[in-house]
Every structure is written in C-alpha cells, then in structure tokens.
Image (cartoon, rainbow, N blue to C red):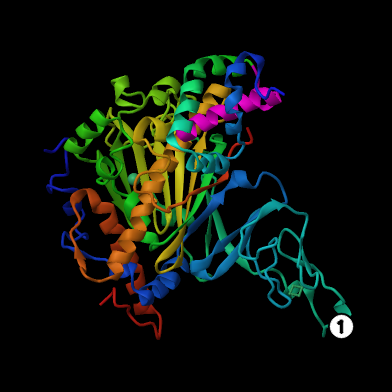
Amino acid sequence: MAKLPADFADLEPFTDWCLDTEDARFAKRYASNMDEMQAFYDAVFPRIQDALTYLDKFELEELSEDAFNLLLLYYSLCTISFPVEAWRQPRVPDAGAAHISNVLAPAV
Amino acid sequence: MAHFPKPAEGSWTQHYPDLSTADASYEDSISPEHYELERKAIFGKTWLNVGRVEQLPKVGSYFTKEIDAARSSVIIVRAADGIKAFHNVCRHRGNKLVWQDFPREEVSGTARQFTCKYHAWRYDLGGACTFVQQESEFFDLDKAKYSLADVRLEIWQGFIFINFDKEGTESLVEYLGPLAAGLEGYPWGEMTSVFKYKSDIGANWKLFIDAFAEFYHAPVLHNRQAVAEESRKLQQYGYEALYYQIEGPHSMVSSWGGMSPPKDPNMVKPIERELRTGLFGPWDKPFDIELPPSLNPARHKAWGVDSFVFFPNFMILVWEPGWYLTYHYWPTAVNRHTFEAALYFAPPKNATERLRQELAAATFKEYGLQDANTLEATQTMLESRAVSEFPLNDQEILLRHLHQTARAFCAEYVKTTPGAKPSPALV
Ligand code: FES
Ligand SMILES: [Fe+2]
C-alpha cells in the first residue's frame, strides 16, 4: 500500500522516515549511518519544492493521511540536515551523551 | 577591534559601577551549603515564571509544576474568576493532590474539581474543600478551614508567575522593572505554534544561564554548524554585542544576526536556502510587528536577537524575524537542573510555513545539545577546585551580573534571617 501521494511514488522506499514525533525522528537519525541518511537526503531534497507546492494546496489541519506522511518525511529531512550538510556524522559533534527531548509540538 | 560602540567608560562592565572587573569565583556553583541558601533566598523569595495563559484555555484547565528548589509542587488552574496557584498538597494528610502514575511527573489537563487519590477529599477549582469522606467521623470539622494552601500568582503579558514568599509585598510588575515594561505590547499571545523541550543537565543552574547569556562562545563552540568558509570568518571576527543593559536583578544583551535572510545565500546550508529558514527562524515575518522600546535598544540595522535574563531563572529571546523563545532552569541539586526551552511562532498558514518552523526548531536543538554538553564538563572541573578564580571579559558581563545578583540575594537572606549562616561562596 502506498503511503505517499501518487506524485511522490519515487520516495516510497523512504517511508520508514515518516515518524510523527520529533523524538522518534531523532532516534532514527542516531540509529542510522551516513550512507543511509545521504541516500534519503539525495532522494527527498531535490523534491522539496514539488512537495511544498503539493501540500500548500490543502489546509494544514485537513491533510489526508498520505499528504501528512509526505510532510512527516520532510520533518525528517530537517532532522538529518545537519549530519548530512554540516558534520558528516549522525551525532552532534561534542554533544556526547547530552539529550534534549521534545515534550510538545504543534498537532500537525 | 571594536565593531560596535561601547559606553563612555570604555566597557559595558565599567558602565555599571556595582560590577567589578576582577576574576570571579565559581564557588557559588559548587558549594552545597550555598545551594541551600539559594533555595531559600532566591527560589523561596522571587517571582518565578511557570508558563503562559494559553496553556489554560478554559475554566478547569490546569497544569502542575514541580519546583524542587522550593521543595514544592504547585497546581496552576483557571477557575471561574481567574487563574490561581495552589500548593499541590491535600489538606487531609498531605498526599500530593494532582498527579498520574508517577508523583514526580508534571501533568496537565482539564478538571471540574480535584479529588485526592488517598481518601477522596475534594476541592473545587478555587481551592475550597467541598467534600470530606465520612465527614461525621471527624471532630467538628469545618471544611471552610481546609482550603488548598494558595501561592501568590500574578500575570504579566500572559506570562504566569508565582512567588513562594507569603510575606512578600512587591508586585510582579515592580519586580520585573523597566526592562519588562519596555517589552509590553509585543504580540506574545499570537505566537501559538509552540515547540517545547526538556533536558536533565548535570550542572548548576547558573552555568547554563551563563552559556546562553554570552555569545562569546558561539563562533567557537558552534563553529561546525556554519558552512566552512563562514565559520572561519566568524571565528576571526569574534563576537561583540550591539548593546547590554542591566536593571536591578535583570539584564539583557542585544545581538546582531545577519542570517535572516543572509547577505550572501552561500553563507548558509543548502536546506536553509531552499526553505528560507534557519537558526534565526523563518526569514519572512509572519506579520508586521512594531518593536516595543526594550527591543533592539541600539536601533541597529543588523539587529538579530535580544536575550533577556529575568532573575532568577527565566530568559526570553526575541528574534528579529518575528518569533520568541523562552528558557527556564529549575535547580534540582547544586550540580543538577532541569532545563526547559519553548519556541513560540505564529500559527503556520500552510505546510511551507510549518516546515520552516520545523527546521528552525531542529536547528535550535542542535545548538542546545552542544551547549548542554559543555556544562557537565565545566561542573566537574569546577568541583575539582584545581582553579578557583576565573577572568570574565566584557562580553560576559551578564554572567558576572547574574552570579553577583544571586550572591547578593543570599547575603541579604543571611543578614535578615536569624540563625542563617553564610556559605563558603559568601565569605
Ligand atoms: S490525604 Fe488526601 S484525602 Fe487523605
Ligand atoms: Fe550556544
């Protein structure tokens, strides 16, 4: 079963990144290696504008499940952008065991 | 290499004659005796911010707040006649009144009344005891005498503050003083897209304020966040604030920030360019905001963010692109505290705006993790007492002021409280 809108079928292999809490996205990042994150990044980054053009047609509170999954995929892109673009490792440099958990986020 | 003008005295620090320029002791961050004094002299006496009115949208909305430094748990609730604070203690035999599963965890929700889990005594939203199980078994019990113990509560600009000092008479507005007065009118209440974070930090509460009250560290500690060329430039340039201001126990630093949008798009990472957002938040303002006088006091074109330290443990950061952030530092021991951060944006109108907020929040967390991790290292080294005096530069004026203020509150407490003894940090 497709999780994403049909226009984004090419991104289906990455739907394990559709995670609805920030802590889950962060945990997946820490559990991934750079090759996995780079592959995800290379697939979704070039389609940012397509995805936003598609999503902006809807009211945020009324996103269908597949559209919401697409948005979640891009939340995950935010989560992995620093490892991929800045420091080439999943963890924040010099952040050791520090942990900051997200305890509240907007409903969508 | 001064980039921005300083006061006539030659430095921000010397502009305030009460501040010394001597090396500073950090005994106040490692002495258990001093922490005991701080708990009473500071957390038992000053106005503490516990949240915002939007957290209590309707009558019956409540949340609890654990304030370990005051050895207290508090219920904040919207009653029919306004928001109130009560000690979270049942008047029968002292059980914690409002909690779920884990007594030490904070909870929130909506209630018509509060019922004790132990013997079912009930209290209405105004704190009055309304039901006593098997009332006739008691001895002439007058329920009216067993209302919940209240805590002083006042609200400023939608920010809810409590004060454990029963005898205190200073109003919240008087306490917050002119810096806060100059923030009134900012559209705090319209920023309802909120992200909150929490972390248990192995360091004295003041050390994390230190880290957020100076940007001297930013080009160094955070150097790998920027693109390589940009970070080289930043480190060479160093850091200077646009303006500092100290008013009583409170203070602020006004900072530049050329990132929203950057002069040269190559200064920022690809995703920031693509989404038009980053550390300074979404580049496009949600609506026009007229800046109240405390913001961008230097009225500088390059203004980026103002950080206010409201003593003891509450910070507000207002960012040029139209959003704000709060920090709280709740001590749990001399060398531990709970750190809270909350980012407040205008409600996103579509997925694009929402995604911009997501990247801003993600970026905040990356910086926060680095900031947090240096603290435990600092705490343990301070505790080694291998070195006891530390030089603070002019860009670290707010730290100097914070520690000096905290010590002054403790010294005053010792002076006015029979039997109180000065800590090693005061002698
Ligand atoms: S302790 Fe609350 S009813 Fe007994
Ligand atoms: Fe920092």
In this view of the protein, which residue sits in the foreground, A85 or B79? A85
- State the residue at coordinates (50%, 19%): A48
The spot of residue B260 in percent (x, y) is 36, 26
Say which element carries label 1: helix
* Ligand 1 lies under 8 Å from the Cβ of mark 1: no
Q: Which residue is mark 1?
A: B137
Q: Label 1 sits on what residue type? A: Glu
The spot of residue B95 in percent (x, y) is 69, 73
Chain for disc number 1: B
Q: On the rendering, which quadrant does ligand 1 occupy?
A: bottom right
| Quarter of the C terminus of chain B within the rendering | bottom left
Most common SS among magenta residues = helix
* Magenta span: A58-80
Question: In the rendered image, which quarter is residue B106 located in?
Answer: bottom right
In this view of the protein, which residue sits in the foreground, B332 or B362? B362
| Quarter of the N terminus of chain B within the rendering | top left
B195, above or below B263, in the image: below
In this view of the protein, which residue sits in the foreground, B148 or B305? B305
- State the residue at coordinates (39%, 21%): B273
A2 vs A39, left or right, is right
A9 magenta-colored: no
Q: Is residue B249 among what the camera can see?
A: no
B45 vs B237, left or right, is right
The spot of residue B342 in percent (x, y) is 50, 44
